[in-house]
Image (spheres, grey):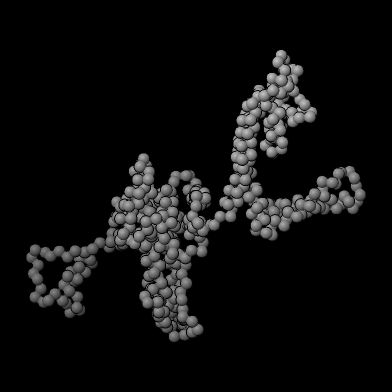
Amino acid sequence: MVNALCLQNFFKDPWNTFDFVTVIGSIVDAMVVEFGENFINVGFLRLFRAARLIKLLRQGYTIRILLWTFVQSFKALPYVCLLIAMLFFIYAIIGMQVFGNIRENPFESITRHNNFRNFIQGLMLLFRCATGENWPNIMLSCIKGRPCDKQANKNIPNSCGSNLAYAYFVSFIFFCSFLMLNLFVAVIMDNFDYLTRDSSILGAHHLDEFVRIWAEYDPNATGKILYQEMYDMLKNMDPPLGFGNKCPNRLAYKKLIRMNMPVDDDGKVNFTTTLFALIRENLNIKMRPAEEMDQADSELRETIKSIWPLQAKNMVDLLVPPNDQLNTGKLTVGKIYAGLLILESWRTTKFGQMEPTGVPVMEDIISSRRPSCESLAEQQQHLPLPTYPNSHRRSPSIKRGGNSPILRSPSPRKPYQHTHHDIGFSDTVTNVVEIVKDKKTTQKRYPRVVNRKRPGQQKSQNTGKHCDGATSDDATAEAQGT
């Protein structure tokens, strides 16, 4: 099983497959030459020896780019060839009708192998003209006053040919040599420019990568994904459109806060809104401070309407969400990740024992590096107890009570810096929901006792305090509770 998987992974690389075929062909060639068997022709086997030079393409980046440009050009070349074939077909039919009756002359350009007698011969003659070989003499051999062929059955001699030959051949050379054939060069140059482009400049080619990665998170093509998946999607997408794997978490949070896409009732964000927000963030299109973003959004909406006046209002709302979708009471990506950024900062200052000024607080709660069980038990009493009913669903960065930094003695060589894990976004939101649910459950389980005085009850002459220091209201509540 292991060998089968190794072989399968080996042949996934085209270069490995090429090496395998080259080595097998060379071995067979060597065996045939060694044993002197002539039951097969070994001439083609020697081609494998020359194929070894292709392995040099793996060593140079520029050579590989040129080879890959040639391979990629084959995708567009069939369409160019089809257009040229249509041009040849039209001109070959016209040549057969106008110049097909000219008599062959071995001392001129219209010969037995170079004429318009049939369609195939006409294509061959046009291909010869397209290469620029002797096309002026061929044109002069087709002008008016040329002798006619015997099979033409024309009574007037020297009446074949036409002065249309000037416009016919000149236009063909113009279209074919100066336009059509240059399309091959244009296709190759376009592919070369595409492969050697600067990846740091945002262009139309980045849209393909965005669509491909979005499809991995939206396999049903609904045009929406969960906001929890957006962070992972943008981290898996290379810059400049995405964040990349090396982007720090805080920088990614800040970018998502500036993008601030609205979240629908299902907790999902739209494809068009996300794409335009990424483009706007990358190209800095009317990006201003937070207090001026409402005005910037309004100006951008007016600009879009002036450029595309026929664009529907719902499409403009997808590109630039209106203020009623971003105001108070509406859930947006910016608000979610702003909360996560605050939580990250709180963890750094609280759990990481860091002051807001950035100075580490070296609190030696434990007297030795190996504290006793009694000291650990005493310190555990000061730790907050978990109050979540389903704490196994929480983020790994939250449930690390046994690895709290206050239970470890800092290193004497360098200040202690607590390393935290990445925040689990969906888990963090789930924790907030759990806290709210836990509070509601506690209120239902232990209802609040309201002290209601009886009509005949008199107010105590004392200030309301008993001997133990409790108030009369507390005593009444305790009595009613029992």
User: On the picture, is 394 further left or further right than 209?
Assistant: left
In depth, the one of 377 and 413 nearer the eye is 413
Say which residue appears at 42% left-offset and 77% top-offset. Answer: 406
Residue 480 in view, yes or no: yes
Determine whether, in the image, residue 58 is placed left or right of residue 106. Answer: left
Q: Is residue 429 above or below residue 205?
A: below
- In this view, which residue lies farthest toward the right? 36
Depth check: 92 or 396 in front?
A: 92
Residue 434 seen anywhere in this rendered image of the structure: no
Who's the residue at 23% across and 63% down the image? 448
Residue 376's spot in the image, x, y percent?
43, 79
The single residue placed furthest to the top in the displayed view is 155
Residue 380 drawn at (x, y percent): 40, 76
Residue 197 image point, x, y percent:
56, 55
Judge whether 263 appears above or below 169 on screen.
Answer: below
- Res 111 → quadrant: top right
Could you tell me residue 79's position as x and y percent? 60, 38
Along the line of sight, which residue is nearer the eye, 1 or 414? 414
Q: Residue at x 63, y 30 (%)?
A: 166
Q: Tally the numbered discs.
A: 0
Work out whether 363 lies above or below 137.
Answer: below
Q: Residue at x 38, y 49 (%)?
A: 319
Image quadrant holding the N terminus, namely bottom right
The quarter of the picture where the C terminus appears is: bottom left
